[in-house]
Amino acid sequence: MLIISLSLFASLFYVLATGHVLSRLFHKEGPNQKLTIVLSTLAILSHMLLLVNSVFTSEGQDLSTVNVALLTCWVIVVSVTAVSLKLPATLLLPVVYGFAAILLTASLFIPHHIVMQTINVDLGLVVHISLSLLAYCVLIIATLYAVQFFYIDNRLKHKDLAIMHSHLPPLMQVERQLYQLLTIGTGLLTLALLSGFVFLDGMFAKEFIHKTVLSLAAWVVFAGVTFGHHQFGWRGKAVVFSIMVASGLVTLAYFGSRFIQEVILGKF
């Protein structure tokens, strides 16, 4: 009952935060920052309490795909909210808050219960998992910036006067932040893959090869786009599309097979 209450409570405040930001998205002064922070903070704290109670159970640690996805989502929400305090990220807030609300609600209907009685703490594994989680979160935020860049650029090309007088950030500022995040995320993904090859056995074993191949494919795209931008000034729709494809690949690598096995096939 506690899990259900926390999920619904967090979802409610994520929805309220989303609605408030969207209602003031094209207003010259933008959303009320204090109200946005209050609503999002209540949602984030509820989300955190949900994670604590979902992962740390009396039987052991529940590290199912759904719980890992909720944790990843929480890290992204906290990161984007923190960024919005200093940098213009108005267009990203309703996306991450709305997705968090959907994921929290969906988690109530998706079966997930994988309990580990004990967790063997291996330094190499901890380093790999930490780098992988950080890389994924940064790259997803970079992807959101890419979508924001595409949206603003498209509206400006269509001479949309509403967006020119809105609270949305300048296009060049969004582009600069996008490639900064992309560079950091690609660097973290590089370190995550290297740590996997150094500390883990069987990266190309049958049960892990799809994750390794998809991660390497995503890395090739991310690294190619990052190098191309810094060396040749690549930008535009093709770059945004490439970033979105790479994000899709790395998402499949991180969550695809586990979701199919745990949720669709019911192998708990």
Image: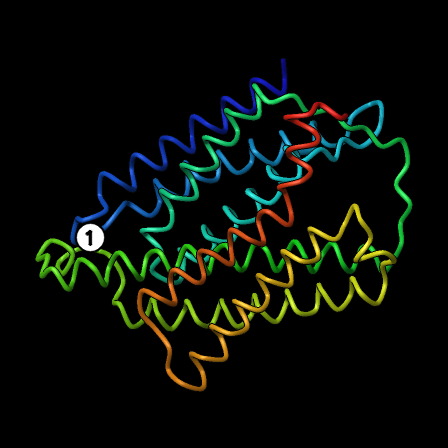
In the rendered image, which quarter is residue 68 located in? top right
Going 71% across and 63% down the picture, which residue do you hit? 192
Residue lying farthest top?
Answer: 1
| Residue topped by disc 1 | 29
Image quarter of the N terminus: top right
Image position, residue 44 (x, y; %): 52, 38
Horizontal relation, residue 23 to residue 70: left or right = left
Q: Residue 145 versus residue 31: which sits nearer the camera?
A: 145
Q: 101 or 246, which lies in front? A: 246
Specify the color scheme. rainbow
Give me the residue at 61% from left, 39% from top: 69
The amino acid marked with disc number 1 is Glu
- Against 150, residue 71 (above or below) is above
Image spot of residue 80 (x, y percent): 46, 53
59 or 81: which is nearer to us? Answer: 59
Left or right of 248 in this view: 200: right
